[in-house]
Each structure stands twice: as structure tokens, then as C-alpha cells.
Image (spheres, rainbow, N blue to C red):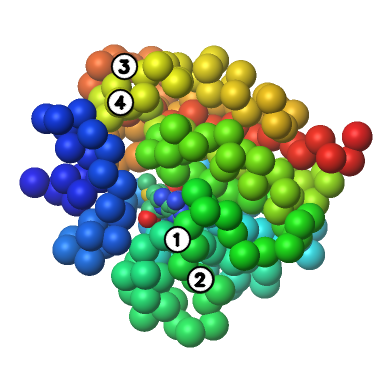
Amino acid sequence: MTYNKHIFDVQNKKVIRDFESAYKNFDNVYPGQFQIDSPKFRLVIDRINLMGKKVKILDIGAGYGAFINHLHQDGIDAIGIDISPTAVEQGKNLYGPDIKLQTGDFLKGLDFADNTFDIIVCYGVFQYVLDFINPCLIEMKRLLKPDGLAALSMGFKNTNVFFREIISDEKDFLEIISKELIIEDFLVYYHEIGTQQNQSQDIDLSSQSRDFLVFARNNKGI
Ligand SMILES: C[S@@+](CC[C@H](N)C(=O)[O-])C[C@H]1O[C@@H](n2cnc3c(N)ncnc32)[C@H](O)[C@@H]1O
């Protein structure tokens, strides 16, 4: 049994979403969050390099805060939010009290003013909250500056069967996002379940998990 038992009840096809119990009862939850050299993080760093280091970044579903710590070390103003108080506490133990990591629930709205962030990263959260995807996108839009950028990822693997009626593939995800934001770029990123390291298009999908990355621009400035 892994921490996923706190997230999905596979037998009864129910989403539990008890991230706090996952972090409380298991170590090294969602290990992919530490792989800062994976494409999903590198692509954001590329965007920051283009936009300049004065950007203000929010990472929603930041977990232990490895990515925002990396950005902070590089002099970038990055704030992380996670629903799990244990993840936040352990992140502060790992990276020190200066790290801007705090608890918050994306589904309830986040305690920041409108038009605050140049980039909002939200990786690996949507697959758990597809039944709330529209309010989440609207909240993201509220928090982004008029021309701000959203970096989103959606994991596709067996667990998604719970929400097939909402999103069954990448096209559905793009369609929903494009109602709120202007799609700039997207790519599919394949990896072995649990390793997130292989990047290849030439693989057997049945044994793979895939992340769909989307970069989308706020349209408030138009
Ligand atoms: C799959 S992990 C992804 C971690 C990291 N963003 C990454 O991509 O490697 C999902 C994270 O989102 C957090 N999360 C889930 N629902 C959330 C919500 N409603 N509000 C804030 N964080 C949430 C979980 O606690 C977990 O740390």
C-alpha cells in the first residue's frame, strides 16, 4: 500500500483526496516533486529566464516546496501553497524558515489579492480536482496579472477513470482551459510511473504514465 490509498479508493471508485494523511503517514510523498531537472520545472525556469528575474511566482500544490526553494535560491520571489500542513511543516524543516511555503486550499480560494502573480505553476493537482476545474481556473485567472502565465500539468494514468466523463484526454483538458485562458504551448511528457525521468515519444503507452503540460496566458490584458 502506498500513500495513494489516502487519495483514491480504487475498489469503490471514490476520490478521497486526503493529502494530509498521505503526507502524515508516509515519507517522500510524490517524489517527482524533487526532480527539479525534469522538463516540467525546466520549462518554467526557461520562461523566467525570458521574462527576467523580477517575476513573482505562485506554485499551487507545492508539496514540500522543492521547486520554490530552487527558485528562491536563485533570487526569485516564489511562494508555494499546499493543502497539507504536514507537507508545509516538513518543507520548512528541509529548506529553512525563509521559504515562502504556506497552507491553503485551491478549491476554497487563496488569500492573495487580484492580479498578483506573473507566473502561476499548478502541476499535478488538476487530476485530483477535475470536478472543480472551472472554479480553479477562474481563481487562477483572478490571481494572475493581466498578461500573466499559467503553467499547468495534468497527469494521465489509471486513476483518471474516476473523471473520464469530465476529461478523457488532452484535447478535453485544452478545451476546458481555453474557456478561461489563451493556450500558448503544450506538450505531452511520458515517464515510467514513479520515476518521471524518461522523455520519449516512442513508447508503449499502456505501461506509461504521462503528464500533459500546458502554458496558457491570462486574457485580462486584451
Ligand atoms: C501530485 S502532487 C504534485 C506536487 C508538485 N506540484 C509536482 O508537480 O511535482 C499534488 C500536490 O497538490 C497538493 N494539493 C492537492 N489538492 C490541493 C488543493 N486543493 N489545494 C492546494 N494543494 C493541493 C497535494 O497535497 C500535493 O502536494
Name above or below for residue 68 compared with residue 30.
below
- Badge 3, how many Cα within 10 Å: few under 14, some, many 20+? few
Image position, residue 207 (x, y; %) = 23, 22
Residue with the mark numbered 3: 205
- Residue drawn at x 16%, y 45% as measured from the top left: 5
Q: Secondary structure at mark 2?
A: strand
Question: How far, Cα to Cα, is label 4 from label 2?
Answer: 30 Å
Q: Which mark is residue 139?
A: none
Q: Amino acid at mark 4?
A: Phe
Mark toward the viewer: 3 or 4: 4
**Given contact means CB atoms under 8 Å apart, are the residues at marks 3 and 4 in contact?**
no
Residue with the mark numbered 2: 101
Name the side, left or right, on which 39 lies relative to 45: left
Q: Amino acid at mark 3?
A: Leu
Residue with the mark numbered 4: 162
Image position, residue 53 (x, y; %) = 75, 62
Of pointers 3 and 2, the one earlier in the residue sequence: 2
Q: Amino acid at mark 2?
A: Leu
Of pointers 1 and 4, the one earlier in the residue sequence: 1
**Given contact means CB atoms under 8 Å apart, are the residues at marks 2 and 1 in contact?**
yes
User: So how many labels did they put on this image?
Assistant: 4
Of pointers 3 and 1, the one earlier in the residue sequence: 1
